[in-house]
Amino acid sequence: MAVAPPRQLSKTFQPTSGTLLVPSHSLTSSQVFTVAQRFLSCSKMRGFVLLLALVYSAAAQHQALIDYLERRLLAIEDRISLWQEQTTRYASELRELKQQMVSQLESLDKEKETLRTTLDGVGTRVDRVERELDYLETQNGAQPCVDVDDKLIEQQVTLVKEKQKAKYFKLTDCSDMISSIKAMKILKRVGGPKGMWTKDTGGASGKVYIFNGTAEDTINEFATVQDFTRSAGFSLSTDVKIPSTWKGTGHVVYNNHVYYVNQEEEIRVVKFDTKNKSITDSVVFPVQDHVPVYGLNPETVMDLAVDEEGLWAIYATRQNERHISMAKMDSNSLDVEQMWDTNCPRENAETAFIICGTLYVVYNTKQPGRSRVQCVFDVNDLVTNEEAPLVYFPKRYGFHASLKYNPQEQLLYAWDDGYQILYKLSMKKKLEI
């Protein structure tokens, strides 16, 4: 019996990856269904495995992110804890500092009250001592402040007689002299410890002039005394610049002109017009070998003064080194009309002024005390040291840098350690002595 050769597989069922090799001629419908189910099951399995792999990968990334965030949060919590500790410590230290400050302030308040009480007691005792000294001075009288040097007097007597041969002819009938300081008024404090302030002593205007310092070239001009007192510093003033630097505090303002002292190689008196802002005249003062006129104000080499008679110059020379000299000047031409050597010593003199032809020299001590008029010189010989009353100034801050007499008001304009002061004078006639 002949055997039939085996049939070849159908081309539609060539083996491929993932397929079941089943001969097409032997597949029944149930077998085909089974094969299909198995094929579907394998596809689902592979999808499921792929899904699991994706889920696992995502879970791993999520966990890493969570770990990173947890580490950052822990670091932030550590910093917050550190800040809280520092804040607590700082708050504690501030409370302790506050308690210490409160304690120290209370202690300072107690010490302040104790010091105030002590100062009040000292002030009372000082006032009592001053009253007792004033009483003793009025009871015992004061010795004139005149240096007794027979040799010096003998050497100078001839020269003094020569200068005083010509009698001084008064320009007015003024015969007033100081009796006492009636009142004192402190206007304000402006400028440095040394300076000069004044009004126009000729009464030409009510302007106030401030010479701040001892070697400057700018004058502060105020329209009135009221402007000066209410001004904050020099804010309400007008600057008046002069062509050369003044020396010392011995200047005056008279009939719209500033008379000031300039020193370069020699002493020069300069006349400056305050309206035209120009120099009207200037002269070299005809005396050689100048020395500072006041022992306690060495910057002042010459002190100009104005009284009822006009312009005067107060100075000192090496020829008469121990004493003060004075001269009458013509305010128009600046000519020197007459000169006198006084018996008032330079030592411990702080400043001087002239009233009705009488020179009043004010003295103090190197450790400032109460200023006093202790030497006078009258060009008409109507007042002597023995007859003149001893005049004390009220206690103040230091010693006077300048005293300027205003004959229109009978006031003294004083500069004392930067304070601008007015002294009201009580007068009497010279013949009443």
Image (cartoon, grey):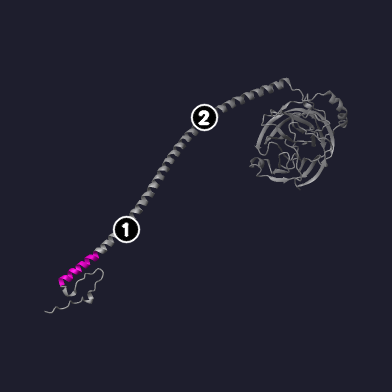
Q: Amino acid at mark 1?
A: Ser
* In-front residue for pair 19/65: 19
Give the image location of residue 157, x and y in percent.
86, 27
- Measured Cα–Cα span from mark 1 to mark 2: 75 Å
Picture residue at 74% right of the left edge, 26% below the top? 390
Q: Which residues are magenta?
A: 29-44
Picture residue at 65% right of the left edge, 23% below the top? 129
Picture residue at 85% right of the left edge, 24% below the top? 151
Give the image location of residue 234, x and y in percent.
66, 43
Q: Is residue 246 left or right of residue 184?
A: right
Give the image location of residue 355, x and y in percent.
77, 33
Q: Secondary structure at mark 2?
A: helix
Residue 255 in view (yes/no):
no
Residue 13 in view (yes/no):
yes
Q: Is residue 124 left or right of residue 380?
A: left
Q: Residue furthest front?
A: 1
Q: What is the total number of numbered labels drawn onto the structure image?
A: 2
* In-front residue for pair 297/312: 297
Q: Quadrant of the C terminus?
A: top right
Q: Counting other residues with Cα less than 10 Å from the Cα at mark 1, is it few (<14), some (14-19), or many (20 or more)?
A: few
Q: Which residue is mark 2?
A: 107
**In the image, is residue 37 part of the stretch drawn in magenta?**
yes
User: In the rendering, which numbered label is found on residue 57?
Assistant: 1
Q: Amino acid at mark 2?
A: Ser
From this view, report whether residue 36 is shown above or below residue 419: below
Say which of marks 1 and 2 sits in front. Answer: 1
From this view, report whether residue 110 is shown above or below residue 71: above
Q: Quadrant of the N terminus?
A: bottom left
Give the image location of residue 27, x and y in percent.
16, 73
Picture residue at 78% right of the left edge, 31% below the top? 359
What is the quadrant of residue 232 in the picture? top right
**In the image, is residue 140 part of the stretch drawn in magenta?**
no
